[in-house]
């Protein structure tokens, strides 16, 4: 009897479920129509006010029908999320369409990892088969996309319990990829074991360090159990399955446990039940986001060295009425006690208001790189209502008046290098040395680093006779391929050690894009030589580093070309460029090149960047260098760079122009008297 009754009730439930599914499909069709109609009428697609009203209406309706508000809002959050995905899909599907039925997604970890689950969630809307390209490290994941073996990379960026994922933040600084999407995934950690395991039997738990830190309260209840870190959650499950030892457990998702057919010993072991990870989707191309969907921009910046510069930078967001969602700081490698700031804010990069804000922000930063513009996903259920409140104002403004105040456009082919863009002098600080403004500095050292003794003797000379920066070429651009090509990284090690011993920042030339990253680890300033002034791929590469760059004027280049070359570096994000006049080719043969001092007052007017004069390469003979160096100071340069050698005749490069130590000392005395 009871059996029959239950069967009947079940039948009724099945019918209700079928109607729910039908109604959901119906709702989806309707919201699709809304998107299409709104698009035809050029109306904003998302109506956050309506979403908020809808939710409160539904909640009160639910209450009347005996359903609690948490339950109703949870379900309707998912329903609203589905509509948002639908809208985003509508505007983004052409971007994500690679012309095939499959999409290649690079992830860290294996199938079953949280990254793979988040990728499945994100890409489900584009109805393509996903081929995972699985890698052990985050940098390898980015490389797969950079080198074209994958279409997209999906990387975890932050977790609501354990915070930012540092390796991914650091990776974003150097990658050429752009963020084109985000996904929020609810992480539900379980303790798993093999079929004969029980919690009591466990002696060792394999876990990803992030997972372990998110479950550390639970783990502390198992004092006899050691935790061994593992690169990936799903891989730790694979490991216990392979080892098949009841004393070994792992922390992983329920899906990973099911995929590998292991036993779930306990569910919900995370410190916080509401545990979400935000993932970013990266691509080689940047994405154009339609004005009618809410968008977000991520950037990374380093503020100027002056006090209060972070406050000044953050004030720019406020004065432009831009809603900042996130601020995360990371130390800058090689610059102790200095930090890069990662910022997320609401806005569309195509919006003139946002462009104006970025321009102003650039003035307060020495590094500024936009990481991407992408449609924003609503954050967490808990934040839903709150977020709507916050977004309301900026969203309405953004859509109703996308182009407010017009700023006078800078017409030149270079903008960031110009005085019009930044009226005050740029002052670049390297260790304790300030380059630019009212300072006059001296960079000195050998043309090439030749040996330990040679470069240490030179460094000592700089320290004792008042120079500020030690120079030395390790990769030499020689006219003849048979001439000495420099000591390479071995020379750089010596230069670095000499700089450290005598507490001098070092500058050295980079010749090729593939060297830049490694040279930037050791050198305080990167030099681009005259022969490479228009090597645009090299300029772009140094533009991605956080090291100041000294750009030497090409021997056949106008100052307009010099400033445009500087713009290549600045536009990549690196706002620390020093210009160098080192002589140009004319019909004159008495001098190695013709030092063009006449351009210094022009450059001082045209640009805010510091300008250094190199009389050594201009004149080419040692006893004519001093008068030119003095002239450079008088005419308004921010410093000079000269070459010297402990034994000039034996120098392996540019022997004729190398000053003796004696001559260098006299030069410094004469400069002091000016
Ligand atoms: C140098 O400074 O060592 C050098 C090679 O200079 P330039 O590029 O000006 O010839
Ligand atoms: Mn030289």
Image: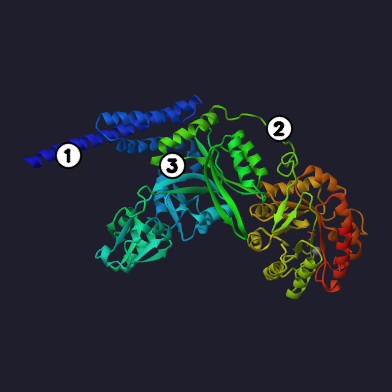
Name the residue furthest bottom.
453
For label 2, the residue is: 408
Name the residue furthest front.
307
Secondary structure of the residue carrying tag 1 is helix
Dots 3 and 2: beta carbons under 8 Å?
no
Please determine whether, in this image, residue 562 is positioned above or below residue 62: below
Q: CA distance from mark 3 to mark 1?
A: 36 Å
Q: Position of residue 156 (x, y in %)?
A: 46, 52
Mark carried by residue 379 = 3
Q: Is residue 206 left or right of residue 302?
A: left
Query: Of label 2 and label 1, which has the lower sequence position?
Result: 1
Where does ligand 2 appear, by image quarter? Answer: bottom right
Where is the N terminus found, in terms of image quarters?
Answer: top left
Q: Position of residue 196 (x, y in %)?
A: 24, 65
Mark carried by residue 670 = none
Where is the C terminus found, in terms of image quarters?
Answer: bottom right
């Amino acid at each position: 009897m009871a059996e029959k009754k239950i069967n009947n009730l079940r039948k009724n439930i099945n019918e209700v479920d079928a109607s729910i599914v039908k109604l959901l499909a119906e709702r989806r069709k309707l919201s699709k129509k809304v998107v299409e109609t709104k698009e035809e009428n050029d109306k904003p697609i998302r109506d956050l006010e309506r979403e908020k009203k809808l939710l409160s209406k539904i909640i009160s309706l639910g209450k009347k029908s005996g359903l609690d508000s948490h339950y109703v809002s949870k379900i309707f959050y998912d329903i609203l999320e589905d509509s948002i995905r639908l809208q985003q899909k509508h505007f983004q599907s052409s971007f994500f369409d690679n012309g095939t039925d499959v999409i290649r997604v690079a992830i860290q970890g294996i199938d079953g990892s949280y990254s793979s689950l988040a990728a499945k969630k994100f890409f489900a809307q584009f109805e393509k088969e996903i081929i995972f390209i699985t890698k052990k490290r985050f940098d390898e994941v980015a490389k797969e996309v950079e080198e074209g073996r994958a279409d997209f990379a999906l990387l975890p960026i932050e977790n609501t319990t354990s915070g930012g994922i540092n390796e991914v933040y650091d990776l974003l600084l150097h990658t050429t990829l752009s963020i084109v999407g985000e996904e929020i995934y609810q992480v539900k950690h379980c303790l798993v074991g093999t079929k004969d395991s029980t919690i009591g039997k466990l002696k060792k738990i394999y876990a990803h360090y992030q997972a372990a830190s998110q479950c550390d309260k639970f783990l502390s209840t198992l004092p006899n159990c050691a935790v061994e870190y593992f690169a990936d959650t799903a891989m730790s499950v694979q490991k216990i399955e392979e080892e098949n030892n009841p004393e070994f457990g792992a922390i992983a998702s329920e899906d990973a446990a099911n995929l590998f057919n292991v036993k779930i010993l306990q569910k919900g072991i995370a410190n916080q039940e509401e545990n979400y990870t935000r993932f970013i989707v990266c691509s080689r191309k940047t994405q154009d986001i339609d004005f009618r969907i809410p968008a977000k921009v991520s950037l990374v910046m380093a503020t100027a060295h002056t006090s209060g510069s972070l406050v000044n930078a953050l004030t720019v967001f406020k004065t432009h009425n831009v809603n900042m969602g996130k601020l995360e700081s990371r130390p800058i490698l090689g610059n102790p006690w200095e930090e890069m700031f990662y910022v997320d804010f609401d806005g569309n990069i195509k919006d003139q208001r946002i462009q104006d804000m970025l321009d102003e922000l650039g003035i307060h930063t020495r590094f500024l790189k936009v990481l991407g513009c992408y449609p924003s996903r609503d954050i967490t259920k808990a934040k839903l209502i709150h977020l709507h409140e916050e977004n309301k104002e900026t969203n309405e403004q953004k859509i109703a008046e996308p182009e407010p105040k017009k700023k006078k456009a800078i017409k030149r082919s270079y903008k960031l290098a110009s005085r019009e863009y930044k009226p005050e002098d740029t002052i670049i600080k390297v260790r304790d040395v300030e380059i630019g403004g009212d300072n006059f500095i001296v960079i000195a050292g050998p043309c090439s680093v030749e040996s330990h003794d040679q470069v240490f003797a030179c460094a000592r000379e700089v320290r004792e006779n008042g120079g500020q920066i030690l120079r030395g070429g390790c990769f030499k651009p020689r006219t003849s391929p048979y001439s000495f090509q420099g000591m390479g990284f071995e020379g750089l090690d010596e230069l670095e050690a000499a700089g450290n011993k005598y507490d001098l920042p070092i500058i050295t030339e980079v010749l090729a894009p593939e060297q830049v990253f490694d040279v930037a680890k050791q050198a305080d300033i990167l030099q681009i030589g005259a022969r490479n002034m228009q090597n645009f791929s090299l300029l772009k590469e140094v533009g991605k580093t956080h090291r100041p760059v000294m750009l030497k004027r090409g021997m056949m280049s106008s100052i307009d070309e010099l400033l445009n070359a500087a713009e290549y570096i600045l536009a990549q994000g690196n706002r620390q460029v020093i210009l160098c006049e080192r002589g140009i080719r004319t019909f004159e043969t008495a001098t190695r090149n013709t030092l063009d001092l006449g351009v210094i007052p022009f450059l001082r007017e045209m640009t805010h960047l510091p300008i250094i004069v190199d009389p050594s390469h201009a004149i080419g003979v040692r006893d004519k260098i001093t008068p030119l160096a003095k002239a450079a100071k008088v005419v308004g340069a921010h410093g000079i760079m000269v070459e010297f050698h402990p034994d000039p005749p034996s120098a392996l490069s540019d022997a004729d122009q190398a000053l003796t130590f004696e001559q260098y000392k006299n030069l410094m005395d004469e400069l002091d008297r000016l």
